Image (cartoon, helix red, strand yellow):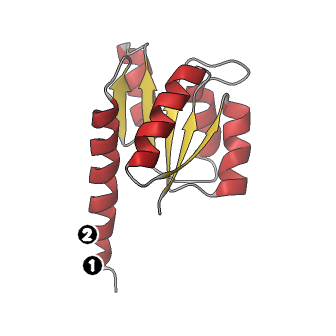
Amino acid sequence: MKTVLVIDDDPIIVRILTVALEVEGYFVISVSNGEDGLQAVVEEDPDIIILDIMMPLMDGLKMLEELRKTSDVPVIVMSADGSHDKVERARELGIECFVNKPFRTTVIVEILDLIFSMEDFSQLFDR
C-alpha cells in the first residue's frame, strides 16, 4: 500500500482527498503546514506528497525548498494560486505535477496512479 502525505491547511480539502484516496487503496497521512510536513516526511517516509502552496507557518514552496535538500520524494503541488511565477518555481524544485484548485479528486487519483505505474514500470529495467 502506497503512503500519501497530504499537506494542506484546509480541513475540508484534506478530508475530501483522504476519503477519495483511501477508497482507491492509498494510506493517507495529513498535516496542515510545511513545518509539520517536513517532520512527517522524516517520521513517515511517504511514497508521494500532495502539497498546497498557501499555508501558515511555512508555505508550500518554502517547504519544498527545504525538502529538496534531503529528499527526492515525488511531489504534486496543488494551489488556488496558479500564477506563472509559482508554477515555475515549483517546477524548478522538481515537482511531478501542478494542479489548480479547485480540482476533481478523480484527477488526483489518476495522477497518482500514473506516477506509481511509471515507477513500477521503470523498476523492470533496474538490474
Mark 2 in CB contact with mark 1 (< 8 angstroms): yes
| Pointer 2 local density, CA inside 10 Å: few below 14, some 14–19, many at least 20 | few
Does 16 sit above or below residue 39?
above
For this rendering, which residue is in front, 119 or 21?
A: 21
Residue 83 appears at what percent x and percent y? Answer: 38, 12
Does 79 sit above or below residue 34?
above
Kind of residue indicated by mark 1: Leu
Residue 61 visible to the viewer: yes
- Count of residue discs: 2
Determine the residue positioned at 34% across, 87% down: 127
Kind of residue indicated by mark 2: Phe
Does 75 sit above or below residue 118?
above
Determine the residue positioned at 31% across, 68% down: 120
Determine the residue positioned at 62% across, 58% down: 45
Q: Please name the residue that numbered disc 1 is placed on.
A: 124
Residue 78 appears at what percent x and percent y? Answer: 43, 27
Does 52 sit above or below residue 26?
above
Marker disc for residue 113: none
Residue 73 appears at what percent x and percent y? Answer: 51, 53
Residue 117 appears at what percent x and percent y? Answer: 28, 61
Left or right: where 12 falls relative to 32:
left
Q: Please name the residue that numbered disc 2 is placed on.
A: 121
Query: Label 2, label 1: how many angstroms apart (C-alpha)?
Result: 6 Å
